[in-house]
Amino acid sequence: MKAIQILKKLNKDKHIEMYYAGEFARDTLRRKKSGKVEIVVCNMQLQQVFKHFKRHFRNIHIASNKNSFSFMADHSEITIKLPKKGTKYSPHYTLKSDSRQRGFTINAMYIPIVSSKGQNVIDFYHARNCIKSRKIKVIGKADTSIKRNPLLMIQAISLSSKLNYRIDNNLFYAIKTNSELIKKVAIELVRDEFIKIILSHKPSRYLKIMNDSYLMNQIIPELSICAGISQNKKYHKYDVFDHCLAACDNIEPDLILRLAALLHDIGKAPTREEVMKGGQLRVTFYNHEVVGSKVAKKILRRLKFSKDITYAVSELVYGHMYNYEPSMWTNAAVRRFIKKAHITGADLDKLPRMPLFLVRKADRAANGLGLSEISPRQYAFEDRIKKVYGQSKALHVTDLNISGDAIMEAFNLKPGPTIGHVLNYLLSLVIEDQKVNTKERLVEEASKYLSDALK
């Protein structure tokens, strides 16, 4: 890296101390690549380092504040900062003071930038042992650290999901004991860590930790209560909670898709009923997709997700229970589905990649019964969508057995946008049922449309 070479030269010429820190130092010792480079500078004013960089990087944007500056160079985000200040009893900017505020031991190591291959590591809290044992520990006593900074609870699970490390037993117990303190943390910060968890390689593993530590009950109680909600064994091996988590595992790491898969059956807890049918007890969840869509919207709004994400996820939850029956679905029913699912001509060549179908695929893969992820009926449905869509688009306003002039004459109307609205409405009726395409019937339907428009 050119930027690092400049720093090394400055380090040598000015006899100052610069250290790789945080995530970069941790991943260097783990022999992993990191796209973020954090460098802590000691024994030199940050403004001097900033001016030095300005001379070498005149054409790049450098964002700066009182204690740090950052820029993009060599395909990496580089942040150069001062050590964090110590306590009021020891108000000096030192590596030791900086390390105390790092939260987790594995984030509190420092490597001199002049070292080769990560040698001469400064490790105040035996973090290298944590890396060796693949363990997440906080700095100091777990209970005290969490009470001082409750955000550490969900950050620990988020970090565990990123590194595939286990959480130290004392830390897990402290999270479980203090889980209600998460409500003191800004919900946006909690949401951001939650996003990292559900976008991880196997989110179910860490969502279970959230639930076992009672954090889930504090953050998304609607999902937590799904644990233990049994389902019909004919269709599902798992309870609702484990099924939702398995669905989240079985869909690609896209935020909207992961959220939709995780919440797709969130409406089952409030709609569950047991009924006797044919002498047998059956479990039902009637209209759980309708209830679930509302619950999902409530959850996402509470977690301060954007309106676009909230709408997209709630729509997928609402739509995931389509039950295509080839013998019962008319072409009109397929057209209504096309309209409801917002399918366009551009989607026809990639129907299996439609978000709604991907959620359905994840739902099926998560039933635990070893069925194929895509059923033969689904393949047939996609083929029929293409066929019906093509037929629908083959009809145009000019195919109607009535013209705009005839509409104006029949209803004493003048030329204008109203005529186009009437013709488009009549076309939609003919697409649904081509028997409507007679002049007499079209005049009748146009009369109803104009009457409703004038109300």
Image (cartoon, helix red, strand yellow):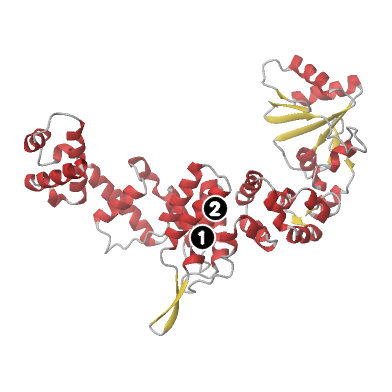
Res. 186 image quadrant: top right
The percent position of residue 393, horizontal first and vertical second, equals 24, 42
Q: Secondary structure at mark 2?
A: helix
Image point (21%, 43%), residue name: 455
Residue position for label 2: 299
Distance between the Cα atoms at labels 1 and 2? 10 Å
Q: Amino acid at mark 1?
A: Ile
Residue type at tag 2: Ile
In which quadrant is the N terminus drawn?
A: top right
Q: Earlier in the sequence, mark 1 or mark 2?
A: 1
- What residue is rendered at 46% in x and 55% in y? 293
Nearer to me, 24 or 40: 40
Q: Is residue 252 visible?
A: no
Q: Residue 42's image quarter?
A: top right
SS of the residue under disc 1: loop
- In the rendered image of this protein, does residue 248 appear above or below residue 19? below
User: Is the residue under label 2 in contact with that under label 1 (CB below 8 Å)?
Assistant: yes
Residue closest to the eye, 272 or 240 = 272
Q: Position of residue 251 (x, y in %)?
A: 53, 53
Instruction: Check residue 342 in the rendering and tell me which mark sits there, or answer none.
Output: none
* Left or right of residue 375: residue 227: right
Return the residue at label 1.
266
Residue at figure coordinates x 29%, y 62% from the top left: 326
* Residue 439 vertical position relative to residue 176 in the rendered view, above or below: above
Q: Within the image, what quadrant is residue 78 found in?
A: top right
Seen at 56% across and 60% down, the residue is: 222
Residue at the front extreme of this rendering:
455
Specify few, some or many for label 1: CA neighbours under 10 Å numbering under 14, 14-19, or 20 or more.
many
Residue 100 % position (x, y): 85, 43
Q: Position of residue 371 (x, y in %)?
A: 47, 66
Closer to the camera, 173 or 349?
173
